[in-house]
Image (cartoon, grey):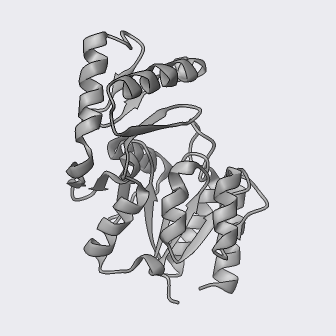
Amino acid sequence: MKYRLCVFDIDGVLNPAGEPVQKESIRALEKLEAHGLKISFASGKHPWYITGGLVFSGLLREDTIVIGETGGHVFFPQQKKSILYTKYLQDVKNLKKIVHEKQVFTHEFWEEPKETLFTVFPRDWDRIPQFENVLQKIIKEENLNLYIIAHVDALDTIQIGLSKRTGLEILCEHLNISLEEMIAFGDGMNDFEMLSCVGYPVAVANAVEEIKEVVKERGGYISESKYGEGVLEAVDYIIENIL
């Protein structure tokens, strides 16, 4: 199989959450580019937020594509073009409306301008479990078709049926490639569908056990090291044995 695209989750893979992309990750991505692979990024966060981090890390390229909001927003930074998967946005919009009406997060949250993500300020990281409980209660009371994935620095509020695979399928159409021609790196449960569908999945050592299990079942690679060192380790293995 000839692989053409490598997709990376960011927080928990290229870097610990809330920290810059590690130098080992940058070296790893540059190695893949030298072997002719395109690089894309997939995150639960808003694409504009992700793009800022890529600029800071020197990783933004002319053909960079960013999958944000857990697959619901595909962004082409250099062209300033977006593809929104609007089919799954209605209940997220409903939750936003209810949160505003109840004033649940007065002075305790901020939202990205595209209406699909709430992000807790870093100073409130220790209160994320409290915010999650409130959102879970509203979702249950209002019978919203949503679920929440908690991270150390954010909560992803996601419409059921939406995943990073959704964004990958949009990329397939745009780039005229197949899922089997993709390699993907992940660590958390919002990477599960992505790692279950690509041609070659990779998990870093700090990944949750469910992610390691699906990667193992599919014959992918699980690194012995965490974060950037694990990414570089896996990329070296892929270059030597897979490409």
Question: What is the x, y in percent for residue 176?
Answer: 29, 80
Q: Residue furthest bottom?
A: 1
Between residues 179 and 49, which one lies in front from this camera angle?
179
Q: Do we see residue 238 in this rendering?
A: yes
Residue at 47% over, 80% down: 180
* Quadrant of the rendered image containing residue 129: top right
Q: Residue furthest right?
A: 224
Question: What is the x, y in percent for residue 102?
Answer: 30, 11
Question: What is the x, y in percent for residue 83?
Answer: 22, 56
Residue at 72% over, 65% down: 222
Between residues 173 and 189, which one lies in front from this camera angle?
189
Left/right placement of residue 133 relative to residue 112 reads right
Left/right placement of residue 209 relative to residue 89 reads right
Residue at 63% over, 54% down: 23
Between residues 230 and 217, which one lies in front from this camera angle?
217
Residue at 39% over, 42% down: 158
Between residues 212 and 233, which one lies in front from this camera angle?
212
Above or below residue 21? Residue 172 is: below
Question: What is the x, y in percent for residue 37?
Answer: 47, 77
Above or below residue 32? Residue 166 is: above
